[in-house]
Amino acid sequence: MLIHGQDAITVSNAGRILRSWETNIGGLNWETSLDTGSFQGAALVGLPEGVKYVAVLKKTALSLHYLSNGHQKWVEHLPESENTQYQLLYSRGTGVIHVLGIVPQSHLNVVTFNVEDGEITRQVRVAAPWLVALQGSCGVLGEAVLVCVDTAARSLHVCALDTEQDMRHIPLQSLELEFADDFQARILTTQPSVTSASRTQFFLQLSPSHFSLLQYKQGLLSHLRDFQQAALVSFATTGEKTVAAVLTCRSELKPGSSDGLHAGSTLEDARRQDSLTCSNQTYNINLYLVETGQRLLDTTITFSLEQGGAKPQQLYIQVFLKKDDSVGYRALVQTEDHMLMFLQQPGKVVWSREESLAEVVSLEMVDLPLTGAQAELEGEFGKKADGLLGMFLKRLSSQLILLQAWTAHLWKMFYDARKPRSQIKNEINIDNLARDEFNLQKMMVMVTASGKLFGIESSSGTILWKQYLRNVRPGSSFKLMVQRTTAHFPHPPQCTLLVKDKETKMSFLYVFNPIFGKRSQVAPPVLKRPILQTLLLPIMDQDYAKVLLLIDDEYKVTPFPATKNVLRQLEEIAHSIYFYLVDAEQGKLSGFRLKKDLSTEESWEVAIPTEVQRIVTVKGKRSNEHVHSQGRVMGDRSVLYKSLNPNLLAVVTESTDTHHERTFIGIFLLDGVTGRIIHSSVQRKAKGPVHMVHSENWVVYQYWNTKARRNELTVLELYEGTEQYNATAFSSLDRPILPQVLQQSYIFPSAISAMEATITERGITSRHLLIGLPSGAILSLPKALLDPRRPEIPTEQSREENLIPYSPDVQIHAERFINYNQTISRMRGIYTAPSGLESTCLVVAYGLDIFQTRVYPSKQFDVLKDDYDYVLISSVLFGLVFATMITKRLAQVKLLNRAWR
Amino acid sequence: MNLFIMYMAGNTISIFPAMMVCMMGWRPLQALMSLSATLKALESSSRRALQGLVFLVGNGLGLALALYKCQAMGLLPTRPSDWLAFVTPPQRMEFTGGGLIL
């Protein structure tokens, strides 16, 4: 992105579109499409009277466009573009543009174009056998002087782009600058305005913490100032003054990471170069005048970051001249964990933003801990019976505690009512977190792609804790599992995160407490081999932690926790534990059975050849899903039993041929234990991306129909028939009859970003499908609309069953949006969780924004309405009771009197 | 006459037929409960046993008619869909887990 005054120029879509934006209001000024070619760089080009053009450098051509309307002035082919990589553009208002290309280890090509007509005015080949890349090693100073650093020879090479043909060699020993080993030296230059020359001062980075300010003027190189302990540098210009801002660490920079959270030694060795950390995370930013290297007084900003957190990665300065002509500035610091901080002199944080929340990868909602009184109640029911007297005394004591809590609550209410409203604070902080009455507030644990974990409270969205994991490289895959919830007081809740690096394939486990965000005391097993997948079993250890099984690439299983109790339990049930692993690259699904000694043997394999189709998604059912009714009631009062196979997998494949006549998607329903294909179907002339929901006994998937050019939804439901095969136990090994599959398709008027089904604790509430639309709205569609038994011609029986007659259109009603006017941009996923109330489901949608709400698919049938008239009903009740008592007494008196007459 | 009343009160479940059926069922029950009182009143006649038997059978028929009406309305739990709410989910014998290779 290039900025000139009010305009910002962007090149997007891999170099295909050039756009100009108005920075004040965000409007688009103009847009033009560029010729094809891989994008290398862009620069503003100006003449002495002002900036008029923007030049775009592609792999083979250079084009110049007008800044006012984007029209192309000229486009020229670059010479020798097959073997030369053109990377750098430079102009300084003299009417020519210099383009530098490099043939690695051989020479540089300097081509000079005339701005008016694109004619090549000068083309020079400069020999540079030591140069490997232009970026970082070279910069343009002063009046078009190219300076490059040669790390191996410890010297600089300079060349005037306008006049000379060879590089002058300047050894750096004379300046007594020591280069660090193993570090590629870098050069940083600055050009205050595109219409004038660059500055003749530049920074040379000799080691990760050593910067040197040098000047090359009129053929002479001089050393201005040295900066040790510097982490980042940045140039900025205001008016006539150019300053350099240097970020230094207050204490000594030490190699190796501090007591942070990192993997074993293998990952650390690989990154020794960048692992200099500031031990107390306190930094200073100072300004220096570039002409002299002199430090400007009163320009220090001091700030500190969290201990064990990320270190700064980028520094941007905004300078301005104050009234007394001194320089004032504000700094924007970007840290490794994608956090932006805006600092003001002398160290105040104006704002800070957690930008890693825009890349949420995985999300789990964890119940909040119980209060002391609630825990007592739970404890009463959880422990073993102590005999009649013991239980009675325990009941008395817990009632006393409840009474105390209730009086304290009443007192607090009374006390608060006397204080003015403004003084009552209802802050949520991590110390007084407790479960509310209906378990509607939960702690959302979010894992982001930068390796930062957040704990966000769901009712207000406040970030309660943050944790940054070092050594997580971009592209790692994460899997978050909840091993123990807060229901087992006094054991702390426990979550496990598996992080797998993409390149080295090594993984590590991070075990933490999701309520406080601190690392757990339990030590996870060290993983020596790459882990392929995990399985969370419902069997628990003695401290109520669910057992996690990790299968590695030698197909051996590691359990966590690995106590004797767990190993004994595993031995007993090992014969009924199966893993399924899907290799999308080879198109293979394989099933493995666990043996007593925790190794596995392959029990089935399904090969889907990758020449024709590739596997896109594999989804099983959610483990905490509870199905309330085992069948559907028919019109004649018989039952059609659902085929509820908890081991069923839904596999979606897309064809490799994407031509609109021959493309297809395939759906396979496989059993995870036997590998038997229960159902397979192919949808011709259909294209992805396919979004799928697999729940209970149905699968709903969405695709693009290329023939009819519309989005379609298809629902598949599996039924056993009118009799259950085995009502007591379900075993995949004993299912001789295949279920019946009923299928129906509908037209959906819009594309889909994300799709998920609501879930409740008991499964009594009707299911709704939450569909995220690209417009930013979330539609709540009742599952009853997507029912394969919907008849085309309604009969008496179908009316009995309340089946809506079939119509191919699914309409999007704006009343069904659950997020009113708060649109969520670029939705990537929707997560649903059950709450304490059966009617309520908690929904979190994440993407660029994060949105949390509660949905009531069957309205709030288990909660009294807001306008429930307590006063009227209780007064009528008490009135009638009194009236009854009084009239009964009167009647008795009357009867007695009559008897005595 | 009871048969006629039952025929007129249709098969839907609304207040009038429900009241009719309830009355039809309650009266024979009440009469059967006062069996001992009726037998005492019949002591004087000669064919006590036969009259008692006819009383019993008549009330039984009335009760049967009420039950038949209930069945026609669909109130008796005779079909499998009535017991669906009590069907427990089958126990899971095998556990599976895994997915796309991480």
Image: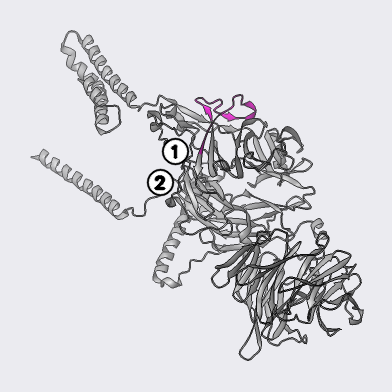
> Residue A870, image x and y in percent?
32, 54
Q: Is residue A650 visible?
A: no
Tell me what residue is drawn at x 35 percent, y 28 percent: B75
Q: Residue furthest left?
A: A901
Q: In the displayed structure, would residue A154 be above or below residue B25?
A: below
User: As drawn, is A728 to the left or to the right of B9?
Assistant: right
Q: Amino acid at mark 2?
A: Phe
In-image side of A418 versus A210 (left or right)? left
Per the rendering, the mark at residue A807 is 1
Disc 2 packing (10 Å; few <14; some 14–19; many ≥20): some
Q: Which mark is residue A861?
A: 2
Q: Nearer the viewer, mark 1 or mark 2?
A: 1
In magenta stretch: residue A720: yes
Q: CA distance from mark 1 to mark 2?
A: 29 Å
> As displayed, is residue A745 above or below residue A268?
above
For the record, the magenta segment spans A719-745
Image vertical order of residue A717 relative to residue A864, above or below: above
> Which type of secondary structure does the marked residue at label 1 adopt?
loop
Label 1 vs 2, first from the N-terminus:
1
Q: Nearer the viewer, residue B69 or A648?
A: A648
Q: Quadrant of the N terminus of chain B?
A: top left
Task: Where is residue A271? Give x, y as percent.
Answer: 80, 62
